Image: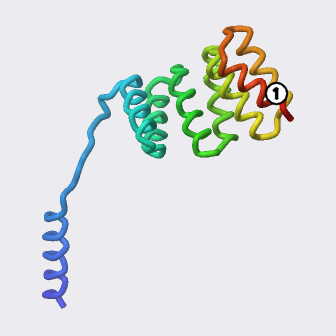
Amino acid sequence: MRTIKFITLIVIFLSSCSLPKIVILENHLTAEEHIDLGYIYEKQGKLDLAEEEYKKAIKKDKKNFIAYFNLGNVYAKKGDYERAERYYKQAIKLREDPDVMNNLAYVLYKQGKKDEALTYIRRALEKREDPSYRDTLESILKE
């Protein structure tokens, strides 16, 4: 019985020593670097990796509106319009950026929230005249 316990301990010890282990002591990337990395992943179509990087950026800097905006873009691309809406609205709380308002208007429209979508696209157009904003407005008004 003692021999079996001893052999079991030796097997456990040897197997634990032979497995490679990666230990990350600290994340040294800045919020901006996480955003840059997320953007690269997003452009490569690696949306899950982009999502992770944008979340890390938000964890590092809760006031970085670009991280919220980009995370909203990832969710919009995934078709998760409710989550996209939530992150776009958080970005707008930090900065009333017309690009964010345009994208928010689009995801609201996709969810059937036409009146709210019109409010945001009109605010975007008040801030800046842009052909893509006009396209969004026309899409919303078609219905």
Q: Residue at x 49, y 29 (%)?
A: 58
Within-10-Å neighbours for mark 1: few <14, some 14–19, many 20+: few
Position of residue 117 in the picture relative to residue 22 (left or right): right
Q: Residue at x 47, y 31 (%)?
A: 59
Quarter of the figure with residue 81:
top right
Front residue of this view, candidates 52 and 136: 136
Position of residue 89 in the picture relative to residue 55 (left or right): right
Position of residue 114 in the picture relative to residue 52 (left or right): right
Question: In the rendered view, how is the structure colored?
Answer: rainbow
Helix, strand or loop at mark 1: helix
Front residue of this view, candidates 82 and 45: 45
Q: Looking at the image, is 111 positioned above or below residue 128? A: below
Please tell me how many numbered marks the rendered image carries: 1
Quarter of the figure with residue 123:
top right
Residue 86: image location, x then y, percent: 67, 33
Quarter of the figure with residue 37:
top left
Residue 112: image location, x then y, percent: 82, 39
Position of residue 105 in the picture relative to residue 73 (left or right): right
Q: Looking at the image, is 118 positioned above or below residue 85? A: above
Residue at numbered disc 1: 116
Front residue of this view, candidates 7 and 65: 65
Q: Label 1 is placed on what type of residue?
A: Glu
Q: Residue at x 84, y 32 (%)?
A: 142
Residue found at the far bottom of this picture: 1
Q: Residue at x 78, y 16 (%)?
A: 122
Q: Looking at the image, is 115 positioned above or below residue 127? A: below
